[in-house]
Image (cartoon, rainbow, N blue to C red):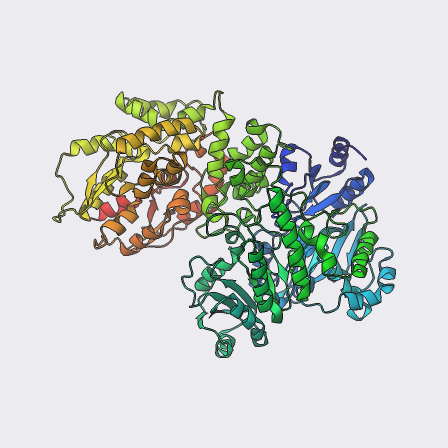
Amino acid sequence: MTSPGELERTLRANLRGEVDFGAAARALATMDASNYRRVPVGVVAPRDADDVAVALALCAEAGVPVVPRGGGTSIAGQATGTGVVLDLNRHMDALLAVDPAARTAVVQPGLVLDRLRDAVRPHGLTFGPDPSTHSRCTLGGMIGNNACGAHSVAWGTTADNVAELAVTAYGGTAHRLARGWAGAPAGLRELVEGNLAVLRTGMSGGFSRRISGYGGLDALLPERGADLARAFCGSEGTLAVVTEAVVRLVELPAAPVLVVLGYADEGAAADAAAGLLPHGPLTVEGMAEDLVRSPAGLPRGGAWLFVEMPDEGAARALLRGADALDAALVTDPAGQRALWRLREDAAGTATRMPDSTMAWPGWEDCAVPPARLGGYLREFRALLAAHGLRGTPYGHFGEGCVHVRIDFDLVTREGVARFRTFSEELADLVAAHGGSLSGEHGDGQARAELLGRMYGPEVIALFAAYKDVWDPAGGMNPGILVRPARLDENLRFAVLPRTPFAGEVATCVGVAKCRSTEVGGAGVMCPSYRATGEERHSTRGRARLLHEMLAGETITGGWRSPEVAEALDLCLGCKGCRSDCPVGVDVAAYKAEFLHRHWAGRLRPVSHYVLGGLPGWLRLITALRATRAVNAAARRIPLPGLARERALPPLAPVPFTRWWRGRGPGVRGGSTVTPAVTVTLWPDTFSEYLAPEAGRAAVRVLEAAGLAVAVPARRVCCGLTYVSTGRLDRARTVLRRTLDAVGEVPGPVLVLEPSCAAALRTDLPALFPDDPRAHRLAAAVRTFAETLEEYAPHWTPPRLDRPVAGQTHCHQHAVLGDAADRRLRERAGLSGELSGGCCGLAGNFGFEPGHHAVSVACAEEQLLPSLRAAAPGTAVLADGFSCRTQIAQLSEGHRARHLAELLAEAL
């Protein structure tokens, strides 16, 4: 066998695409969205089909296996491997042609599903299969897994929607597959003709979700037209590599209507699902109350069916025929999207149990004939209980396909043994109901070992022969489907140390919502990935690199790892992943811990001292009465260690607390009401030294609302800048002094700067888990809008009656929430939405060398376009100082203000 170094050099010399056998590239491809981990020898990103053919030929000559990979969202381990990983998403992601009349499209395998759907939507068309990962899964991956999604009741699986495939086999031979034997590999027709009886009887009794194994192999029967393309779907990268596909499109309903039916329990909902199919639904999805933690907007019941109908007439007919406990009919598209979001996020939501422990994939999508679903689910729940396991089933009830994540212990020997025993018994249960071990995600390593419990030995032998016809050298994704690896080996947790940090990193299950490139909405995650398009700069990529750093196999530098440092360097610390990631992966917290250890005992970058120590520097400058001199110098002399593209914001001539002390006692904003509540206004670093006008405005509004205002007499700091630069020991020192200064918190603590409020809410108790003072202060923190809503509920804000644009601070979105802000803006007559995403400045991030381009790219995604589109007279609103600074520096003629300023001006 050729050495990895020789193979890398040969591939580099012969391919136009990228070849990367480095530690970071290999680490990023060790895992998909499953429980499994296999370390590849390298990663190749081919430019086109010719590159694929050359790579497959060279790998075959070298005796190195190949694994095709799209979005890496497979949940059974089939997108991992020990050979060369072909990253088909990087370059081979084009939509080559659309024929609206024929209702077909020609796509490359790396094209993300949503890009196809967006492109054909103007023609009134869509691609029928729509898994919940539609914003990041690729067409090639969908073909490999025979993916389905919510609408397969109406539009079928991916195999039902593929007309032709161009594929390249191991060794480099190209094939064009459609209906008929043209393009078939040598020996395939003879294999089929010699096994007609097995195909007709051993694979009989099939239903729409029989995906397991080479479940489409019976499409090669003569009476089914020898459909080579259909038979290839679901082969999980074990036969050849898809380089192009002709897919069928379906008509998009003009005004679909969502009917939500409530039932007493899950079993009743499952029993009812099959009876709804004669009404012609587009989808029949089910979930129970143990998954829906907040059933707001849902009808009464303990379980629900989400039934989408093509129009309102069909929906009302369904309602008349449904025997449900309660029902809701939703015609409003926004209301439908809100309800569907519950379902789409279930893959991640189900990963967290109510007590915050983790549940894992592995038995994610078994399927049984729909008429047997109720009985199957009752027995499944009983099997879980018998093994002391927990899981929250949901899924495509109209097709009998159930998703579930289970709280397996995949770390200890006893837990892994129970995982195996449960898996064997569940496979028997599925087979007893005439079901399929996989209903849409493929078998991978998780279930392939157990296929013999579903199919007889003749069928399993036929699968092996089918694989060998296509791949006689066994180089395509070995260990998957045929001659499979054991389901309890290659588990990704086995390589990790048993530490709390490792446990946090391992919570990333790889569903890759962070790789979505959809623009719009309130979401934040993941701004640096959206700017660069590189996996290492996604939430998942960073978590994977940390996982491999802790494992120490591919990333060998430990906490001093340059690969991890490079990936985390472009993390903005926006905390968007904390809220937007379905499992709450918090890369900002991981980055702080990594930087803390990475720089331990060493001189840090200058920016860590300058920006990380900002509160101390500003306090010193103010104490020395040097504000004017520093402002003048900053305009002329670049500060060492900071980005030269950025101008430093000027310091205010009078800090907020100096103004407060000079204001004198008893001065209030005109209210004659005796204050019932005293609000402690927190003098954060930004409101104190850089934007005291926000603090002064807040005092005026609070007093006008009848609230008394107090300011801490001693120096306080949230520690944000120290945490964000990983100076955690210094952060603890500063916060300990703050806790001593604050003492007992008498009431609400209003923090005007969202990033400082978020630090007090989350970082403070995390750094002092055993100090009750930290938890009391964290619980007392309120935003400006929350304070007015909770403690001055009867106050009427002044009416501004203006449109607004601007930025919701990413920390507010991720940690604090903005519901109270929205309500306050509405009461004040401020109409319109603020931008989602991240402004891109993100505290110290945008001032650090090498970050300017990404910082600007983040602002250009949503914020700056929204400001350019704003009508004259629009108020520009941004509660975060970083957001206001970014707007001032990158937009033309816009001055953003804190909400407190807008209200104070109108009083």
The one nearer the camera, 268 or 536, is: 268
Q: Residue 713's spot in the image, x, y percent?
A: 22, 31
**Location of residue 712 (image quadrant):** top left
Relative to residue 31, is residue 287 depicted above or below?
A: below
- Residue 810 visible? The answer is yes
**Location of residue 441 (image quadrant):** bottom right
The one nearer the camera, 423 or 570, is: 423
- Residue 107 visible? The answer is no
Q: Residue 751's spot in the image, x, y percent?
A: 30, 40
Q: Residue 66's spot in the image, x, y percent?
A: 74, 44
**Location of residue 293 (image quadrant):** bottom left
Q: Residue 74's spot in the image, x, y percent?
A: 63, 51
Number of disc labels: 0
The one nearer the camera, 248 or 559, is: 559
Relative to residue 441, is residue 271 depicted above or below?
A: below
Name the quarter where the N terminus is drawn: top right
